Image: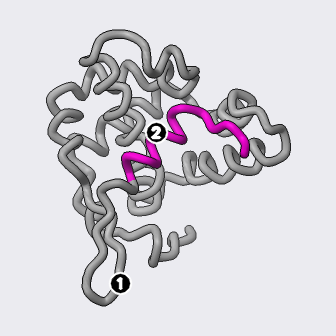
Amino acid sequence: MIENAMWFNEGHACFFEAAEIDNKGRVELPEDNRVYHLLDNLDAAVNLLPKIIHADRSAFYGGSDQQRSLNYTTAWALVYFLRKGVPCQERSAYENILGTYLKTLASTKDCEAATTAAFEGINMTRFKDDFKDFWKKGRNSARRYNPLTEKKSSK
Protein backbone atom coordinates (compact mmCIF):
# COMPACT_ATOMS: atom_id res chain seq x y z
CA MET A 1 0.00 0.00 0.00
CA ILE A 2 1.41 3.33 -1.10
CA GLU A 3 -0.09 6.53 0.25
CA ASN A 4 -1.68 8.61 -2.52
CA ALA A 5 -1.91 12.37 -2.71
CA MET A 6 -5.20 13.60 -1.31
CA TRP A 7 -6.29 15.16 -4.62
CA PHE A 8 -5.72 11.84 -6.39
CA ASN A 9 -7.22 9.62 -3.70
CA GLU A 10 -10.31 11.63 -2.79
CA GLY A 11 -10.81 12.92 -6.32
CA HIS A 12 -10.97 9.38 -7.69
CA ALA A 13 -13.14 8.18 -4.80
CA CYS A 14 -15.67 10.90 -5.61
CA PHE A 15 -15.34 10.30 -9.35
CA PHE A 16 -16.10 6.59 -9.08
CA GLU A 17 -18.78 6.85 -6.39
CA ALA A 18 -21.08 8.30 -9.07
CA ALA A 19 -20.59 5.25 -11.31
CA GLU A 20 -23.74 3.69 -12.68
CA ILE A 21 -23.96 0.12 -13.95
CA ASP A 22 -26.73 -0.80 -16.37
CA ASN A 23 -28.41 -4.20 -16.66
CA LYS A 24 -25.79 -5.31 -19.21
CA GLY A 25 -22.91 -4.51 -16.86
CA ARG A 26 -21.81 -1.36 -18.69
CA VAL A 27 -20.34 1.27 -16.40
CA GLU A 28 -21.07 4.95 -16.91
CA LEU A 29 -19.24 7.73 -15.08
CA PRO A 30 -21.62 10.70 -15.10
CA GLU A 31 -21.33 14.05 -13.43
CA ASP A 32 -22.81 13.88 -9.98
CA ASN A 33 -24.45 16.46 -7.73
CA ARG A 34 -21.03 17.93 -6.93
CA VAL A 35 -21.24 19.74 -10.25
CA TYR A 36 -23.79 22.18 -8.79
CA HIS A 37 -21.57 22.89 -5.79
CA LEU A 38 -18.64 23.39 -8.13
CA LEU A 39 -20.46 25.75 -10.48
CA ASP A 40 -21.76 27.79 -7.53
CA ASN A 41 -18.17 28.08 -6.21
CA LEU A 42 -16.17 27.89 -9.43
CA ASP A 43 -13.87 30.86 -8.81
CA ALA A 44 -13.03 29.62 -5.31
CA ALA A 45 -12.38 26.09 -6.63
CA VAL A 46 -10.14 27.39 -9.42
CA ASN A 47 -8.12 29.43 -6.94
CA LEU A 48 -7.94 26.40 -4.64
CA LEU A 49 -6.42 24.10 -7.29
CA PRO A 50 -2.70 24.72 -6.51
CA LYS A 51 -3.37 24.29 -2.79
CA ILE A 52 -5.47 21.12 -3.27
CA ILE A 53 -2.86 19.54 -5.52
CA HIS A 54 -0.28 19.79 -2.74
CA ALA A 55 -2.58 19.39 0.28
CA ASP A 56 -1.59 16.80 2.84
CA ARG A 57 -4.13 14.95 4.96
CA SER A 58 -4.45 17.64 7.63
CA ALA A 59 -4.80 20.45 5.08
CA PHE A 60 -7.38 18.53 3.03
CA TYR A 61 -9.53 17.48 5.99
CA GLY A 62 -8.91 20.60 8.12
CA GLY A 63 -10.96 23.74 8.29
CA SER A 64 -14.69 24.23 8.32
CA ASP A 65 -17.28 21.84 6.94
CA GLN A 66 -17.75 24.21 4.01
CA GLN A 67 -14.02 24.20 3.25
CA ARG A 68 -13.82 20.42 3.45
CA SER A 69 -16.80 20.13 1.13
CA LEU A 70 -15.14 22.47 -1.37
CA ASN A 71 -11.90 20.45 -1.09
CA TYR A 72 -13.77 17.27 -2.05
CA THR A 73 -15.63 19.01 -4.85
CA THR A 74 -12.43 20.52 -6.24
CA ALA A 75 -10.58 17.19 -6.11
CA TRP A 76 -13.53 15.48 -7.87
CA ALA A 77 -13.66 18.22 -10.52
CA LEU A 78 -9.91 17.96 -11.10
CA VAL A 79 -10.07 14.19 -11.64
CA TYR A 80 -13.17 14.54 -13.83
CA PHE A 81 -11.35 17.14 -15.92
CA LEU A 82 -8.24 14.98 -16.26
CA ARG A 83 -10.14 11.73 -16.95
CA LYS A 84 -12.92 13.02 -19.19
CA GLY A 85 -12.27 16.62 -20.20
CA VAL A 86 -8.65 16.40 -21.29
CA PRO A 87 -9.18 13.49 -23.72
CA CYS A 88 -12.31 15.05 -25.23
CA GLN A 89 -10.81 18.46 -25.73
CA GLU A 90 -7.43 17.10 -26.81
CA ARG A 91 -5.56 19.19 -24.29
CA SER A 92 -2.25 17.49 -24.91
CA ALA A 93 -0.41 19.62 -22.36
CA TYR A 94 -2.31 17.76 -19.63
CA GLU A 95 -2.69 14.26 -21.06
CA ASN A 96 0.28 12.81 -19.17
CA ILE A 97 -0.49 14.20 -15.71
CA LEU A 98 -2.20 11.07 -14.37
CA GLY A 99 0.24 8.63 -15.98
CA THR A 100 3.26 10.58 -14.74
CA TYR A 101 1.74 10.73 -11.27
CA LEU A 102 1.25 6.96 -11.12
CA LYS A 103 4.64 6.07 -12.61
CA THR A 104 6.46 8.42 -10.26
CA LEU A 105 4.48 7.23 -7.26
CA ALA A 106 5.31 3.61 -8.10
CA SER A 107 9.03 4.36 -8.37
CA THR A 108 9.44 6.83 -5.50
CA LYS A 109 6.66 5.76 -3.11
CA ASP A 110 6.34 9.49 -2.40
CA CYS A 111 2.99 11.10 -3.23
CA GLU A 112 4.32 14.66 -3.05
CA ALA A 113 7.19 13.82 -5.40
CA ALA A 114 4.67 12.17 -7.73
CA THR A 115 2.43 15.24 -7.68
CA THR A 116 5.38 17.52 -8.32
CA ALA A 117 6.50 15.37 -11.26
CA ALA A 118 2.96 15.15 -12.66
CA PHE A 119 2.53 18.91 -12.76
CA GLU A 120 6.11 19.74 -13.71
CA GLY A 121 6.15 22.05 -16.70
CA ILE A 122 2.43 22.80 -16.39
CA ASN A 123 1.69 26.51 -16.50
CA MET A 124 -0.66 26.68 -13.50
CA THR A 125 -2.23 29.95 -14.60
CA ARG A 126 -3.10 28.43 -17.96
CA PHE A 127 -4.21 25.19 -16.29
CA LYS A 128 -6.59 27.09 -14.02
CA ASP A 129 -7.98 29.01 -17.00
CA ASP A 130 -8.50 25.79 -19.00
CA PHE A 131 -10.09 24.07 -16.00
CA LYS A 132 -12.48 26.99 -15.50
CA ASP A 133 -13.29 27.19 -19.20
CA PHE A 134 -14.05 23.47 -19.28
CA TRP A 135 -16.46 23.71 -16.36
CA LYS A 136 -18.15 26.84 -17.71
CA LYS A 137 -18.70 25.72 -21.31
CA GLY A 138 -16.77 22.64 -22.38
CA ARG A 139 -18.45 19.71 -20.72
CA ASN A 140 -20.80 18.43 -23.43
CA SER A 141 -18.39 15.99 -25.08
CA ALA A 142 -16.97 14.94 -21.71
CA ARG A 143 -20.40 13.95 -20.46
CA ARG A 144 -20.63 11.40 -23.28
CA TYR A 145 -17.01 10.22 -23.01
CA ASN A 146 -16.36 7.06 -21.01
CA PRO A 147 -12.69 6.66 -20.08
CA LEU A 148 -13.31 2.99 -19.24
CA THR A 149 -14.32 2.09 -22.78
CA GLU A 150 -13.02 4.74 -25.16
CA LYS A 151 -9.51 5.33 -26.37
CA LYS A 152 -8.02 8.78 -26.41
CA SER A 153 -7.62 10.13 -29.89
CA SER A 154 -4.07 10.88 -30.87
CA LYS A 155 -3.12 14.02 -32.71
Q: Residues within 10 Å of mark 2 (few under 14, many from 20)?
A: many
Residue range corresponding to the magenta coloring = 1-15
Q: Circle 1 is placed at which residue position? A: 25
**Number of the label disc, if any, that sits on residue 10:** 2
Q: Work out which quarter of the rendered image holds the C terminus and state it.
A: bottom right
Specify whether residue 2 is painted magenta. yes
Relative to the observer, which residue lies in front, 120 or 68?
Answer: 68
Q: Magenta residues: mostly which secondary structure? A: helix
Residue sitting at x 55%, y 47% = 94
Residue 128 location, quadrant: top left
Looking at the picture, does residue 52 appear above or below residue 85? above
Left or right for 103, reference 22: right
CA gap between label 1 and label 2 equals 25 Å
Q: Type of residue at label 2?
A: Glu
Name the N-terminal-most of marks 1 and 2.
2
Left or right for 95, reference 74: right
Specify whether residue 12 is painted magenta. yes
Looking at the picture, does residue 145 appear above or below residue 106? below
Q: Type of residue at label 1?
A: Gly
Q: Element at badge 2?
A: helix
Q: Residues within 10 Å of mark 1 (few under 14, many from 20)?
A: few
Measured from the top left, where is residue 106 in percent x and y? 79, 48
Residue 72 location, quadrant: top left
Measured from the top left, where is residue 127 in percent x and y? 46, 34
Relative to the observer, which residue lies in front, 76 or 9?
Answer: 9
Left or right for 40, reference 106: left
Residue sitting at x 40%, y 20% = 48
Residue sitting at x 31%, y 17% = 67
Measured from the top left, where is residue 134 in percent x and y? 31, 45
- What colouring method underlies this structural image? one colour
Residue furthest out toward the front: 1
